[in-house]
């Protein structure tokens, strides 16, 4: 059965973006970008929601970002607001319940699955018990005043077993966990 990994990038206080800050908070470095390049070469299907799709498809259309690696891979977009045909190559639109569809993809498929962005999608897949790995890259900033899109808002309590960690460029912290959704605080 293929694994589902939720990939997250956040500030130290859990924001996925911040008003006025550049992408990756302007702190991406050569080690991190090399690692992302290695990761992009892996074979997996990317899962995303409509907002993330619109953002990345816009990057492709404008040519402002190198999106060749992501463009080449299979992508599934869960949305009730987008309509066919989607313009980004190798992208399939799924209007149904994401948890049901991903459960079937895991049961019937053989390709690993990963999310990209898509905060509400990640949360719903975690709550449904479908997430096998949670990989978080923490950028060394606190966005208390300018933070947007707090990643963990609305999440249940989750116990995390650390299975990997790494430092990139002497400042970015990558941590990979096996998550277990809890009914409440441990007793």
Image: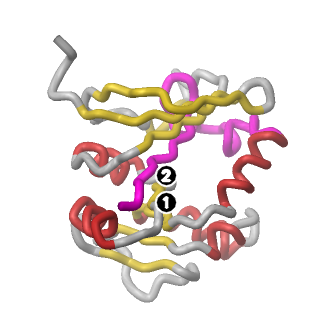
Using the image, tell me which numbered label, if any, was put on residue 119. none
* Residue lying at the far top of the rendered structure: 187
Identify the residue at image location x=50%, y=32%.
163
Q: Quadrant of residue 38?
A: bottom right
* Residue lying at the far front of the rendered structure: 1
**Residue 1 or 133: which is nearer the viewer?**
1
Identify the residue at image location x=44%, y=88%.
85
Measured as percent of width and height from the top left, residue 33 is found at: 77, 47
N-terminal-most mark, 1 or 2: 1
Q: Are marks 1 and 2 in contact (CB under 8 Å)?
A: yes
Write the start and end of the magenta stretch as one range.
1-29
Q: Dividing the image into 4 quarters, which one contains the C terminus?
A: top left
Image vertical order of residue 182 relative to residue 80, above or below:
above
Residue behind mark 2: 117
Image vertical order of residue 156 relative to residue 80, above or below:
above
Measured as percent of width and height from the top left, residue 10 is found at: 55, 34
Residue behind mark 1: 52
């Amino acid at each position: 059965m293929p694994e589902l990994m939720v990939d997250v990038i956040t500030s130290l206080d859990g924001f996925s973006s911040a008003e006025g800050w550049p992408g990756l908070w302007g702190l991406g470095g050569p080690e991190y970008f090399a690692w992302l390049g290695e990761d992009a070469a892996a074979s997996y299907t990317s899962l995303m929601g409509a907002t993330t799709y619109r953002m990345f498809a816009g990057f492709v259309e404008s040519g402002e970002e190198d999106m060749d690696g992501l463009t080449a891979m299979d992508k599934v977009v869960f949305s009730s607001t987008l309509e066919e045909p989607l313009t980004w190559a190798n992208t399939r639109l799924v209007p149904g319940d994401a948890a049901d569809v991903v459960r079937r993809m895991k049961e019937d498929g053989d390709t690993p699955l990963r999310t990209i962005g898509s905060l509400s999608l990640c949360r719903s897949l975690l709550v449904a018990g479908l997430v096998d790995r949670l990989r978080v890259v923490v950028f060394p900033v606190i966005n208390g005043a300018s933070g947007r899109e707090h990643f963990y808002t609305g999440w249940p309590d989750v116990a995390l077993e650390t299975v990997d960690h790494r430092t990139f460029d002497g400042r970015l912290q990558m941590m990979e966990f096996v998550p277990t959704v809890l009914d409440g605080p441990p007793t």
